[in-house]
Image (cartoon, helix red, strand yellow):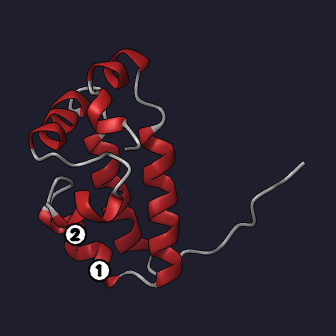
């Protein structure tokens, strides 16, 4: 069975700040507003860089992300993509345009 290698985080404090912003956006209290915001801005949820630069995860998250090393950025992107897949199916269906691949 495949097991992903554990890569150590280089800047733990900055990494945790960006991770916390993602967790907050996808929290049960805020996820619907977050998806609605993406829909209004015509952004796709899987386009992490565009979501980030548009300030949808907060300006602090964008600034912190820019400070991360390439390895840390990759782990954040992976965390973001795995988090967006955990959104409830009914919300994903409601915001199908945001989740669509086209």
- Position of residue 90 measured from the top left corner of the image (x, y, whole percent): 36, 15
- Nearest the viewer among 42 and 2 is 42
Does 1 sit left or right of 52 as displayed? right
In 3D space, how far apart are the residues under numbered discs 1 and 2 (Cα atoms)?
A: 6 Å
Instruction: Please name the residue that numbered disc 2 is placed on.
Output: 62
Residue under the point 20% across and 75% down: 63
- Residues 73 and 47: in front is 47
**Looking at the image, which is closer to me, 36 or 86?**
36
Residue at image x 36%, y 36%?
A: 99
Outermost residue on the front side: it is 102
In the drawing, does residue 94 fall left or right of residue 80?
Answer: left
Q: Is residue 90 above or below residue 14?
A: above
> Where does the image place residue 65, in percent across and percent down from the top left?
31, 73
Residue at the far top in the pictured view: 90
* Quarter of the figure that contains the C terminus: top left
Q: Residue at x 27, y 33 (%)?
A: 97
Where on the picture, by quarter, is residue 16? bottom left
- Element at badge 1? helix
Residue pointed to by mark 1: 66
């Amino acid at each position: 069975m495949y097991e992903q290698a554990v890569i150590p985080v280089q800047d733990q404090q900055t990494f945790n700040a960006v991770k916390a912003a993602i967790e907050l956006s996808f929290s049960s209290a805020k996820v619907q507003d977050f998806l609605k915001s993406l829909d209004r801005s015509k952004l796709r949820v899987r386009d992490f860089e565009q979501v980030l630069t548009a300030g949808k995860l907060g300006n602090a998250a964008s600034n912190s992300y820019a400070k991360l090393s390439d390895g840390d950025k990759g782990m954040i992107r992976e965390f973001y993509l795995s988090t967006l897949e955990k959104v409830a199916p009914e919300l994903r269906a409601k915001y199908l345009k945001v989740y669509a691949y086209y």
